Image (cartoon, rainbow, N blue to C red):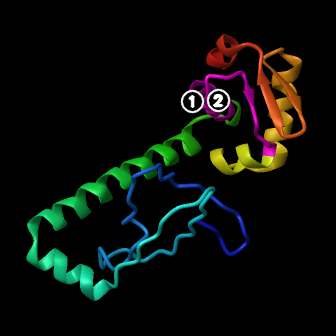
Amino acid sequence: MISEEGREITLYHLRDGCYDVLSASCVVNQITFDTHMTAVRGCTLLIVPASVLAGFKAGNVHVRCFIYETLTMRFSDVMWMMQQTLFLRVDQRIAGYLLKRYAETKSPELALTHEQIALEINTAREVVARMMRNFVSDGLVEGGRGRIVIRDPEGLRRV
């Protein structure tokens, strides 16, 4: 979501094979917010007109179940992100994000910028830069332009 001042918060990510119905106000009439989607790589987007989807929902209990199950999963993702943002310190969110990427890539070298991390954990780039300097001085990571090398995964876990 993007505020009028231009601040962003990432609510959730869609992975390969995922569907997004939370941003579709035509699915649930009570949804009254705008969202912004960003594709980080090529994707296929299918937009179903509200009238067509309403017909599918009305005539097929399986479609209704699919929509509501998908909404429940997305809502759970949003609540998890809100918990992270509200209740964890920024250094904990950064450490957790770096460890997650480390586990996904199976490599200690991550192609990441401070801006990318900030967008992912919902904070300002300057805050990430300050925390990363602390991580570097503590020997947890090594930094470079557009790259971060994890030197002490166990130390990040302790954060």
Span highlighted in magenta in the image: 93-114
Q: Earlier in the sequence, mark 2 or mark 1?
A: 2
Q: Is residue 84 above or below residue 31?
A: above
Side of 76 where 149 appears, left or right: right
Q: Secondary structure at mark 2?
A: helix
Which residue was labeled with disc 1?
Answer: 104
> Which residue is at a point 17% across and 67% down the rendered structure image?
64
Which residue was labeled with disc 2?
Answer: 92
Which quadrant is the C terminus positioned in?
Answer: top right
Q: Secondary structure at mark 1?
A: helix
Q: Is residue 112 magenta?
A: yes
> Which residue is at a point 22% across and 82% down the rendered structure image?
54
Q: List x then y, in percent, for residue 76.
A: 37, 48
Q: List x then y, in percent, for residue 62.
A: 13, 63
Which marked residue is nearer to the observer: mark 2 or mark 1?
Answer: 1
Which quadrant is the N terminus positioned in?
Answer: bottom right
> Which residue is at a point 78% across and 49% down the rendered structure image?
115
Residue 52 location, quadrant: bottom left
Residue 84 location, quadrant: top right
Label 1 Cα crowd, 10 Å radius (few <14 / some 14-19 / many 20+): few
Q: List x then y, in percent, for residue 124.
A: 77, 50
Nearer to me, 104 or 143: 104
Q: Amino acid at mark 1?
A: Glu
Q: Is residue 159 magenta?
A: no
